[in-house]
């Protein structure tokens, strides 16, 4: 890999043919079955802060929804709500649509996605989730493969509607860091932000 990213380093220069002007992730969007329930879960249990809401939006006759968003032409956006936690803006969306699928993809399904939240103390975070009646899947596991390092762990849990989320912690870094000066972004290490 050219232009290694070391702690506190600059972003690597863009490669030919890559997206011009890409400055990073602005937000992650999740479509949820009940925006009130989802907002309570993220703001209550996980400590996100609600910023604003807007909607509803619908189109009663054109193909706008299909052309611009690849969804059913009569899909109705009930509401969009923006939340934030530290380094993540989260957009919650609720829709009604004649062809809507109501099953959350399993973690192995194409199109499945999850958000991983970094925690300082995995045992304490998992205990908190269990005490709060969140559905913790199994329990903490060591990070596999090149990620393996002392006390590096992850643990999946589910929202009330079945969306997978992950806790991750690596207080002594990740094992790959022993092999290269390059660094992935880490919320635990502000030096990994690209200038």
Image (cartoon, rainbow, N blue to C red):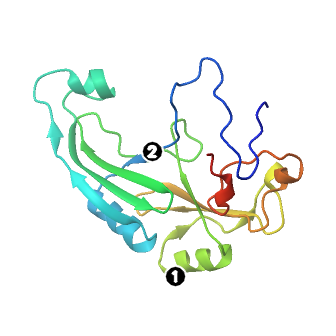
> Is 148 situated left or right of 77 in this image?
right
> Is 190 situated left or right of 33 in this image?
right
Is residue 26 at least partly visible in the picture?
A: yes
Q: Residue at x 66, y 69 (%)?
A: 139
Quick one: 15 or 121, which is closer to the camera?
15
Q: Is label 1 in a helix, a strand or a loop? A: helix
Quick one: 52 or 77, which is closer to the camera?
52
Residue at the far left: name it.
60
Q: Residue at x 52, y 25 (%)?
A: 20
Mark 1–mark 2 Cα distance, whole angstroms, equals: 32 Å
Is residue 145 at least partly visible in the picture?
A: no
Find residue 128 and report its horizontal and vertical position in percent.
55, 79
Q: Is residue 138 above or below residue 93?
A: below
Find residue 131 and report its horizontal and vertical position in percent.
52, 82
Quick one: 55 or 172, which is closer to the camera?
172
Find residue 148 and report its horizontal and vertical position in percent.
82, 57
Q: Tell me the residue that label 1 is attached to.
A: 131
Q: Residue at x 30, y 38 (%)?
A: 100
> Is 90 situated left or right of 52 in this image?
right
Find residue 90 and report its horizontal and vertical position in percent.
41, 53
Q: Tell me the residue that label 2 is attached to.
A: 26
Residue at the far right: name it.
179
Q: Is label 2 in a helix, a strand or a loop? A: loop
């Amino acid at each position: 890999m050219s232009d290694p990213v070391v702690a506190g380093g600059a972003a690597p220069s863009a490669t030919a043919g890559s997206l011009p002007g890409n400055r990073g992730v602005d937000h992650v969007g999740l479509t949820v079955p009940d925006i009130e329930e989802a907002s309570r879960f993220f703001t209550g249990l996980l400590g996100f802060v609600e910023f604003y809401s807007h909607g509803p939006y619908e189109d009663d006759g054109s193909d706008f929804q299909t052309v611009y968003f690849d969804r059913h032409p009569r899909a109705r956006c009930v509401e969009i709500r923006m939340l934030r936690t530290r380094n993540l803006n989260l957009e919650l969306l609720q829709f009604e649509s004649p062809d809507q699928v109501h099953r959350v993809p399993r973690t192995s399904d194409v199109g499945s996605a999850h958000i991983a939240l970094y925690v300082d103390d995995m045992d304490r975070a998992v205990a908190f989730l269990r005490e709060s009646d969140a559905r913790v899947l199994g329990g903490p596991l060591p990070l596999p493969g090149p990620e393996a390092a002392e006390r590096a762990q992850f643990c999946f849990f589910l929202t009330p509607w079945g969306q997978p989320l992950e806790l991750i912690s690596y207080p002594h870094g990740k094992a790959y860091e022993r092999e290269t000066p390059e660094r992935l972004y880490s919320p635990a290490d502000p030096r990994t932000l690209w200038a």
